[in-house]
Image (cartoon, rainbow, N blue to C red):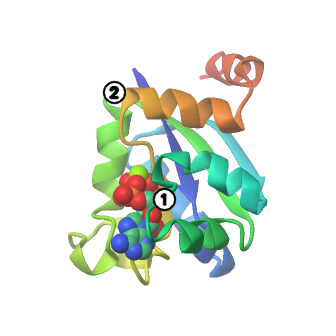
């Protein structure tokens, strides 16, 4: 079993796509292990995306990620990190494959509806950023 950190980004929450995206997550066979609605401050968004600090899109990215509520989730499945990235599709919605979430719900490379961890180390950091260990351990104990 593997866990990944998923985010339904502020653009998708604003457009009331949360329920549809959650349905896609469950239909794809992921177990939801934790879930919160968060309104990130600019500083919290900068901390989350710290690996991108210094890149030209960093200011726009962190402004967008702190522009409204987002849904953060821990998803569990065999190969969850790769499988969630596959379901999301390419970063740029116009390049994402047919049937992927970003193709369907993203509107630009900046406003691309969802986030997913890209490796086991980043998943561990990102899950810890939003969910204390004790909360996750409890979630793991049910179903
Ligand atoms: P995410 O980390 O959000 O799951 P990703 O792993 O597909 O997306 P990254 O390279 O980690 O892509 O970039 C993080 C986010 O920064 C992207 O989701 C996108 O919203 C934004 N981003 C990346 N590249 C650009 C760009 N060239 N112009 C504008 N925004 C960008
Ligand atoms: Mg990334």
Q: Is residue 67 left or right of residue 113?
A: right
Q: Quadrant of the C terminus?
A: top right
Q: Residues within 10 Å of mark 2 (few under 14, many from 20)?
A: few
Q: Nearer the viewer, residue 129 or 131?
A: 129
Give the secondary structure at mark 1: loop
Give the number of the disc on residue 54.
Answer: 1
Q: Position of residue 49 (x, y in %)?
A: 55, 51
Q: Nearer the viewer, residue 101 or 45?
A: 45
**Residue 109 percent across, percent down from the top left:** 39, 76
- Is the residue 79 above or below the residue 14 in the image? above
| Residue at mark 1 to residue at mark 2: CA–CA distance | 34 Å
Q: Is residue 119 left or right of residue 137?
A: left
Residue at the image point whose x is 44% and y is 77% from the top: 105
Q: Is residue 17 visible?
A: no
Residue annotated with mark 2: 78
Could you tell me which residue is drawn at 70 percent across and 38 percent down? 130
Foreground: disc 1 or disc 2: 1
At a point 47% along the width and 54% down the height, the residue shown is 52
Q: Earlier in the sequence, mark 1 or mark 2?
A: 1
Residue at the outermost front position: 54
Look at the numbered disc 1 and say if its residue's Cβ is closer than 8 Å to ligand 1: no
Count of residue discs: 2
Residue at x 33% of width, y 76% of height: 93
- Circle on res. 119: none
Q: Position of residue 6 (x, y in %)?
A: 52, 48
């Amino acid at each position: 079993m593997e866990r990944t950190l998923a985010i339904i980004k502020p653009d998708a929450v604003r457009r009331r796509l949360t329920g549809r995206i959650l349905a896609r997550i469950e239909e794809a066979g992921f177990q939801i292990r934790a879930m919160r609605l968060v309104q990130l401050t600019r500083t919290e968004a900068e901390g989350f995306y710290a690996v991108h600090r210094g890149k030209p899109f960093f200011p726009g990215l962190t402004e967008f990620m702190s522009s409204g509520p987002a849904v953060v989730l821990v998803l569990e499945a065999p190969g969850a990190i790769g499988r969630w990235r596959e379901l999301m599709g390419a970063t740029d919605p116009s390049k994402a494959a047919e049937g992927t979430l970003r193709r369907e719900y993203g509107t630009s490379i900046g406003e691309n509806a969802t986030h997913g961890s890209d490796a086991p180390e980043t998943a561990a950091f990102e899950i810890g950023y939003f969910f204390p260990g004790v909360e996750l351990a409890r979630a793991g104990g049910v179903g």
